[in-house]
């Protein structure tokens, strides 16, 4: 049984799309199980349907308004045309005065999910042999949970995809089934173990971070940049722990794991969605997967 696992990573999901495109279209991998966290959850349904051109068009055309109904960020360009990103303090203050729990809202993302992923496509996947699994974090019970397409209606499954992407406190916190829910990455950034527990014997894993840490963040300039750095630190620790646990589980069950990391640091703020950059990242992911598999083929021993 072959599984595809895609980690969280916000706008960097475009890179994962490129890698997956190569694995599915060029290597002809036909996966039985797809598991996604956060941005990974947005990709996997269309990858399972093999509607890669459709999801590529979405990932290479979104912008901030496609995601945020109330954005916590200000994006400006300096005199050298470099992008400057900061917190919209007035907007955040206005939300706090209204009693809101988060700095921003991502309700536009839920609308986009329903526009792109149709009920017909949902029904096709639900009745197929493939399983599509979404990672979410239950903040009320302090649990990581996995939601299979087999168990839910169209509306509920779209909610779980959306919930998996909500990077609190910058995006919406969702109240559902009597609990508060948020981004799946808070509990399982790279759910390799879940794929193995569900029976996968070969797992292709796309991790939207570099394998080696190349980045040293600049000192925090205010409370919000400190919070961003703190979130980044926690997510990095969770990711490394997930990978270590996944490899341990694979060794115990003789499963094969193929890892695909980003070769370079793509961005320091994955909640900023830039069409030009995401288009470039998609192509980079495709080319990286092609080169990696070419290198692997070259180092394999030749049979006499």
Image (spheres, rainbow, N blue to C red):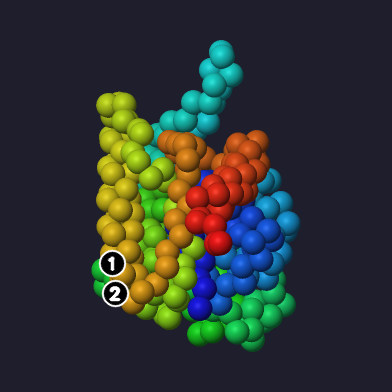
Is residue 27 depicted above or below 149 in this figure?
above
The CA span between labels 1 and 2 is 6 Å
Residue 252: which numbered mark, if any? Answer: 2
Q: Are marks 1 and 2 in contact (CB under 8 Å)?
A: yes
Left or right of 35, for residue 239: left
Q: Residue at x 60, y 42 (%)?
A: 284
Furthest-top residue in this view: 79
Q: In terms of depth relative to the viewer, which is nearer, 11 or 118?
A: 11
Q: Position of residue 245 (x, y in %)?
A: 28, 64
Residue 248: which numbered mark, if any? Answer: 1
- Residue 283: tell me if it is visible: yes
Q: In terms of depth relative to the viewer, which is nearer, 269 or 163?
A: 269
Which quarter of the rendered picture does the C terminus lie within?
A: bottom right
Left or right of 178, for residue 281: right
Q: In terms of depth relative to the viewer, which is nearer, 105 or 125?
A: 125
Is residue 270 depicted above or below 189 in this figure?
above
Q: Position of residue 47 (x, y in %)?
A: 63, 65
Q: In terms of depth relative to the viewer, which is nearer, 258 or 273?
A: 258
Q: Residue at x 28, y 29 (%)?
A: 220
The image quarter containing residue 199 is bottom left
Is residue 86 depicted above or below 253 in this figure?
above
SS at mark 2 in the image: helix
Q: Position of residue 150 (x, y in %)?
A: 54, 84
Q: Residues within 10 Å of mark 2 (few under 14, many from 20)?
A: few
Q: Residue at x 42, y 64 (%)?
A: 257
Is residue 119 depicted above or below 70 in this figure?
below
Q: Position of residue 128 (x, y in %)?
A: 64, 84
Q: Residues within 10 Å of mark 1 (few under 14, many from 20)?
A: some
Left or right of 229, for residue 123: right
């Amino acid at each position: 049984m072959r599984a595809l696992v895609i980690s969280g990573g916000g706008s960097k999901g475009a890179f994962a799309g490129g890698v997956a495109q190569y694995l599915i279209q060029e290597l002809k991998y036909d996966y039985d199980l797809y598991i996604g966290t956060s941005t990974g959850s947005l990709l996997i349904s269309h990858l399972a349907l093999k509607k890669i051109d459709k999801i590529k068009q979405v990932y290479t055309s979104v912008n901030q308004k496609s995601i945020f109904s109330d954005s916590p960020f200000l994006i400006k360009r300096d005199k050298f045309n470099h992008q400057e990103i900061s917190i919209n303090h007035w907007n955040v203050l206005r939300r706090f005065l209204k009693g809101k729990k988060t700095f921003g809202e991502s309700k536009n993302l839920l609308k986009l999910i329903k526009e792109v992923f149709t009920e017909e496509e949902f029904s096709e996947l639900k009745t197929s042999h493939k399983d599509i699994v979404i990672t979410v974090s239950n903040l009320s019970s302090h649990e990581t949970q996995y939601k299979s397409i087999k168990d839910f209606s169209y509306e509920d499954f779209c909610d779980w995809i959306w919930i998996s992407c909500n990077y609190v406190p910058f995006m919406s916190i969702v109240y559902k089934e009597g609990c508060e829910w948020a981004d799946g990455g808070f509990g399982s950034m790279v759910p390799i173990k879940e794929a193995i527990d569900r029976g996968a014997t070969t797992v292709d894993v796309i991790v939207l971070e570099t394998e080696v840490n190349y980045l040293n963040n600049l000192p925090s300039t205010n409370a919000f940049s400190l919070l961003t750095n703190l979130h980044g630190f926690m997510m990095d620790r969770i990711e490394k722990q997930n990978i270590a646990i996944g490899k341990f589980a694979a060794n115990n069950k003789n499963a094969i794991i193929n890892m695909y990391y980003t070769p370079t640091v793509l961005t320091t703020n994955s909640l900023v969605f830039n069409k030009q950059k995401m288009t470039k990242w998609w192509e980079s992911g495709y080319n990286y997967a092609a080169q990696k598999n070419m290198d692997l083929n070259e180092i394999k021993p030749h049979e006499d």
